[in-house]
Amino acid sequence: MHGDELTPWLVRQAYRHGAFVMGEDDGTVDFFQPYVRAMMPIEGLRVSRSLRRTLRSERFKITFDTAYEEVMRACRRPRENWINEPIIRTYMEIFRQGWGHSAECWYEGRLVGGTYGLAVGLCFSAESMFHRETDAGKVALWAMVERCREMGFLLFDAQVMNPHLESLGAYPMAQAEFLRFLHESEGESTPWSQRAG
């Protein structure tokens, strides 16, 4: 579909039915449902020794919801990019509605890492992450998982498995099982998702 047709309502309906949005450079967008989803353990990431040292050092300052658009734009890749302007426009409206959230990682006043996603019911779906300093993206993802658990989310969806997520403890969940969770928890919410309507 053309990106101009994308709305927060359409995105919410897609996520309630287990689909997520991806865009093309020509401004079009589409919805996808993988056979198997990547889930991050809501009880916490698998933290390596080096990442544990980074967390203990408190080298990075962590914030939430202070630079949503900047995080989105930083997650864009030079090639094979799926975050286009219609998605940024729509997700910024979702952020203003209160169900889009980001975790930011700062070093000496500079945004050096982050992740963002959408809160629908008891599931948080992380869209992407980036880093400009070693471990900054991992620290942001760690912080987001910790905050989501505190908020009462039961699932942390990372959508598509890759070796990086797997190294942090991501595990596969069949799409059918994911859809069953969405159906059974429909109507429930957290402080981050309750304003989604």
Image: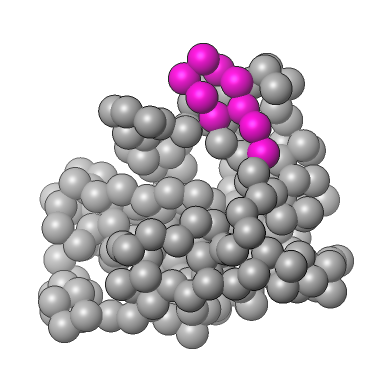
Q: Residue at x 32, y 33 (%)?
A: 77
x then y, percent, for residue 3: 64, 21
- Please tell me which residue is depicted at 16% across the width and 73% down the height of the picture: 54
151 to the left or right of 188: left
Q: Position of residue 75 (x, y in %)?
A: 36, 40
Q: Quadrant of the N terminus?
A: top right
**Residue stretch in magenta:** 23-31
Which residue is located at x 54 percent, y 29 percent?
23
- The foreground one among 17 and 154 is 17
Place of residue 89 in the rendered image (x, y in percent of width and height, measured from the top left): 57, 26
* Res 90 → quadrant: top right
The front one of 171 and 77 is 171
Q: Is residue 141 left or right of residue 121?
A: left
The question of residue 52 being in magenta is answered with no
Report if residue 93 is visible in the image.
no
- In the picture provided, is 2 more to the left or to the right than 17? left
Residue, far front:
35
> Which residue corresponds to the image point at 77% horizontal and 55% vertical from the top-left?
16
